[in-house]
Amino acid sequence: MQREEKQLEASLDALLSQAADLKNSLGSFIYKLENEYDRLTWPSVLDSFALLSGQLNTLNKVLKHEKTPLFRNQVIIPLVLSPDRDEDLMRQTEGRVPVFSHEVVPDHLRTKPDPEVEEQEKQLTTDAARIGADAAQKQIQNLNKMCSNLLEKISKEERESESGGLRSNKQTFNPADTNALVAAVAFGKGLSNWRPSGSSGPGQPGQPGAGTILAGTSGLQQVQMAGTPSQQQPMLSGVQMAQAGQPGKMPSGIKTNIKSASMHPYQR
């Protein structure tokens, strides 16, 4: 008799320890959900679920152990019922049960579910027993088919979303070519210093250089001394009218003087 009592006490202590660990884990997880939901990540939630699952499995192993007595054979009888506040009961239940009266005893010492829940469970058991083996197998096949179709749709949606993400992230330009183009435009990198033949300065092809203009102006002074004002004035006005409205070219007076310098020496 004493051996059975000691074994029962040891089993109860083990159950209380496992239940306390499970309660602490649940309390910390609920605290995270209520106060740290903005910083809570999915991996931490999975870790909390894994911890709770492991503690529940450990509790089931303790209950199914061969040395654990059958608690269903033990009977708990309330010896004293009082409507007064019990401080020891408050401390042991952590403030959840202040009194041990006839109102709370049926709830805390009940070994069966509520009558309504028990009636519903019996009804479900009766309905399950009425279904034949063929009908049950057909329902199982239909359920499996629905689950397979649902899983296939979910997999298809995942594949489409992944392919769409790959298409949206596909690169449509070459970074090396872009960098080379920017360097060429901004700094002239990679551009050659090629000039067309016959050009004598930094000007564009077909335009006279600065040396030619200076040489023309020096020849202009000599020709103006030889020619008459009446011969130079019509030519000057005609060239100025022709060159008006052409931006980007040299002043018409300089070009007229260059032409005069090149014409008069050979018309003598």
Image (cartoon, helix red, strand yellow):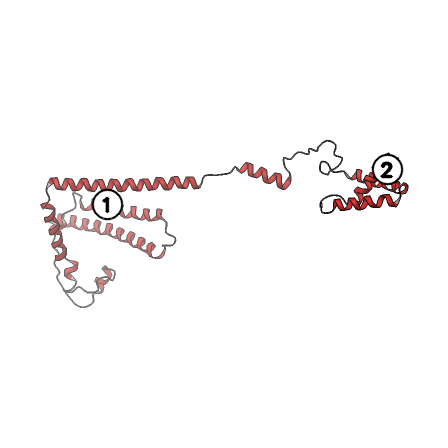
Quadrant housing residue 164: top left
The extreme top residue here reads: 197
Q: Nearer the viewer, mark 1 or mark 2?
A: 2
Instruction: Compare residues 267 and 265 and report the one nearer the observer.
Output: 267
Q: Which amino acid is tagged 1?
A: Asn
Quadrant housing residue 225: top right
Taking the image as drawn, is residue 112 in sight? Answer: no
Residue at figure coordinates x 61%, y 39% from the top left: 183
Q: Give the SS element for disc 1.
A: helix
| Of pointers 1 and 2, the one earlier in the residue sequence | 1
Residue at figure coordinates x 59%, y 40% from the top left: 182
Indicate which disc residue 264 carries: 2
Q: Residues within 10 Å of mark 2 (few under 14, many from 20)?
A: few
Disc 1 versus disc 2: distance between alpha carbons?
117 Å
**Where does residue 224 sit, x and y in percent of width and height?**
88, 42
**Where does residue 64 sit, x and y in percent of width and height?**
17, 44
**Where does residue 73 sit, x and y in percent of width and height?**
11, 50
Instruction: Compare residues 166 and 76 and report the one nearer the observer.
Output: 166
Q: Are marks 1 and 2 in contact (CB under 8 Å)?
A: no
Q: Is residue 173 shown left or right of residue 105?
A: right
Indicate which disc residue 57 carries: 1
